[in-house]
Image (cartoon, rainbow, N blue to C red):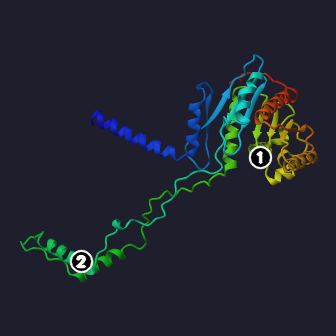
């Protein structure tokens, strides 16, 4: 094979890979974002969904503390339709908290709906079909008979005669009769496939990968900051382990939370009864509906006996002022209710 041929095949293979990758909108978005931020901020985490054999790489953006005394780590979860460096809430928090000694990891969450290759629903094109009339069939058979009669001679030098149609039909019936059972020629994979995970289940796998990354890097004081719909994902993640979460070493900040009806009406379904770790619920005091939902969550937290649950309202007419007020409020709350625990490497 020539060098030019080899290069051509490599190019064709690479183009095929590019086309396949372009169908995965999550991968495309993460790859584009990784090229817009500084290379040192890019971290790829490995996740695996139960219905897939291969391991996926998920983008996370990390920043190290910028003061000697490290306070801990903050895991940032963005809202639906956003990304790990979203200009509202998520991006500013991930860039500002390191100034106060926090290691930030902004995690890419899966899209709410997965884009998959559609199955073919159209019938084959007309040119792919060959229509043969009865007269054409007779003509084809006659030509085939003439070809076979002149093609061979027996040992006496006389050409073999084609078998009669009755003999051919009899032989065919005998051949078909020898097969007592139909032959399965289905070449499809018979392996039972795992059911596809929901968006919430995939998100929980991402969150677990982010938490494992922080723990493997020695961080013992971990804060989850979840924005809007991601608040529901954060509660899903701690639901099964809420009773074992200690009063120190973990905290949660819910920013403008959007919860499922179950959690909105009864936080004990996620926190259990007597949740020990601190939680701050920040809502934007914009209209009466938001205030009513916040009041419901506060009452639900009291019923769940979450003694360290705190609710804060923020009001600002200008988005920039609201952003600055949010960062300042979270920073002061972390200093008071989630005091720093120095990060140290875990012995391996």
Look at the numbered discs 1 and 2 and tell me whether their residues touch, using CB distance below 8 Å: no
- The N terminus lies in quadrant: top left
Q: Quadrant of residue 179?
A: bottom left
Task: In this rendered view, identify the residue nearer to me: 69 or 150.
Answer: 69
Task: Give the SS element for disc 1.
Answer: helix
Identity of the residue furthest to the front in this view: 317
Viewer can see residue 55: no
Q: Is residue 46 left or right of residue 224?
A: left
Q: Earlier in the sequence, mark 1 or mark 2?
A: 2
Q: Is residue 81 above or below residue 118?
A: above
The image shows residue 85 at horizontal and vertical percentages of 66, 34
Residue 292: give x, y in percent of width and height.
88, 50
- Packing grade of label 2 (10 A; few <14, some 14-19, many >=20) is few
Q: Which one is in front, 19 or 249?
A: 19
Q: Which residue is mark 2?
A: 136
Which residue is disc 1 drawn over? Answer: 232
Give residue 286's position: percent from left, percent from top: 83, 44
How far apart are the alpha carbons under marks 1 and 2?
Answer: 69 Å
Q: Is residue 40 above or below residue 91?
A: above
Query: Which numbered dot is residue 279?
Result: none
Specify the farthest residue to the left.
157
In percent of width and height, residue 118 lies at 52, 57
Judging depth in this view, the residue of 141 and 11 nearest the camera is 11
Q: Residue at x 90, y 45 (%)?
A: 298
As drawn, which residue projects farthest toward the top?
A: 68
């Amino acid at each position: 094979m020539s060098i030019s041929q080899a290069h051509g095949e490599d190019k064709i293979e690479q183009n095929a890979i590019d086309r396949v990758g372009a169908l995965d909108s999550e991968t495309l978005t993460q790859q584009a974002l990784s090229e817009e931020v500084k290379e040192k901020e890019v971290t790829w985490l490995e996740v695996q969904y139960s219905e897939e054999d291969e391991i996926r790489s998920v983008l996370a953006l990390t920043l190290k503390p910028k003061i000697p005394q490290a306070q801990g780590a903050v895991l940032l979860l963005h809202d639906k339709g956003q990304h790990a460096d979203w200009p509202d809430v998520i991006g500013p928090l991930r860039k500002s908290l390191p100034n106060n000694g926090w290691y930030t990891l902004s995690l890419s969450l899966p899209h709410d709906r997965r884009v998959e290759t559609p199955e073919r629903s159209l019938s084959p094109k007309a040119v792919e079909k060959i229509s043969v009339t009865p007269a054409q069939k007779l003509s084809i058979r006659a030509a085939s008979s003439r070809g076979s009669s002149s093609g061979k001679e027996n040992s006496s030098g006389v050409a073999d005669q084609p078998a009669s149609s009755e003999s051919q039909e009899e032989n065919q019936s005998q051949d078909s009769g020898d097969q007592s059972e139909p032959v399965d020629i289905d070449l499809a994979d018979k392996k039972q496939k795992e059911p596809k995970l929901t968006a919430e289940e995939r998100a929980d796998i991402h969150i677990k990968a982010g938490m494992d990354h922080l723990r493997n890097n020695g961080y013992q004081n971990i804060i989850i900051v979840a924005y809007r719909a991601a608040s529901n994902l954060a509660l899903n993640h701690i639901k099964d382990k809420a009773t074992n979460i200690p009063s120190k070493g973990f905290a949660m900040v819910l920013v403008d939370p959007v919860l499922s009806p179950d959690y909105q009406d009864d936080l004990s379904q996620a926190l259990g009864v007597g949740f020990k770790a601190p939680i701050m619920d920040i809502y934007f005091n914009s209209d009466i509906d938001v205030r009513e939902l916040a009041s419901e969550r506060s009452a639900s937290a009291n019923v769940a006996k979450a003694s360290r649950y705190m609710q804060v309202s923020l009001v600002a007419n200008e988005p920039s002022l609201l952003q600055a007020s949010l960062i300042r409020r979270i920073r002061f709350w972390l200093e008071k209710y989630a005091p720093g625990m120095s990060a140290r490497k875990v012995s391996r």
